[in-house]
Image: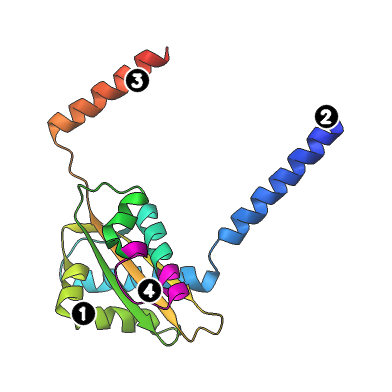
Amino acid sequence: MNARMRTLTAGIIAAGIATSTAAAAPPPAQVSLERAVIKQMNVVRAKFNRPVLKPNSALIRAARLHSAYMAETGTFQHEGPNNAPFWHRIVRQGMSRNQRMAENLAMMPSCDAATAKVIVKMWMDSPAHRANVLDPQLRSTGVGVALNPGCTRVMITADYASQLRVTRARAAAIARAKAHSRARAR
């Protein structure tokens, strides 16, 4: 393959990657609603003197995947394909199974400006969902939204996780493993 063909092939591959990456980006309305739900949960948590929930990319991926799954299959449940529990999908996205995890779901008939407040109010009116929103051990969250084209059906998943506590013994073991890995790389 000559230099011109290599350049053309690389350009086509790069264009394909850019297109697939751009296609994977969620629509602005979806991202806006996801952020609004997190913001509203933090407003409520502040009223109860709870720590702020921080967005976590692994939890966001898990939540988006589940909302899309529910929208595609017409289901409304915590279990995913093959009835796998919610935490399986969270662990597959990179969270440690040694963390405390929780999940809230909601389904709404619209996605107007008040949707985030309505969702969080619904969760606060349900004892189990309220417990997840207010749990002080849960410090990270990811909200995923699936919108249909007319925004007449909205599926919302909020996944939560605690901070991973690493004991001194575990931290030392991790440091030894990293040092061993660096030594082997030389």
Q: Is residue 98 above or below residue 64?
A: above
Residue type pointed to by label 2: Met
Q: Are marks 3 and 4 in contact (CB under 8 Å)?
A: no
Q: What is the quadrant of the N terminus in the image?
A: top right
Q: Which mark is residue 156?
A: 4
Q: Are marks 4 and 1 in contact (CB under 8 Å)?
A: no
- Residue identifier under label 2: 1
Corner quadrant of residue 112: bottom left
- Residue identifier under label 3: 181
N-term-proximal mark, 2 vs 1: 2
Residue type pointed to by label 3: Ser
**Magenta residues, start to end:** 67-82
Q: Residue at x 55, y 61 (%)?
A: 25
N-term-proximal mark, 2 vs 4: 2
- Residue identifier under label 1: 124
Residue density around tag 1, few if under 14, some if 14–19, many if 20 or more, within 10 Å? some
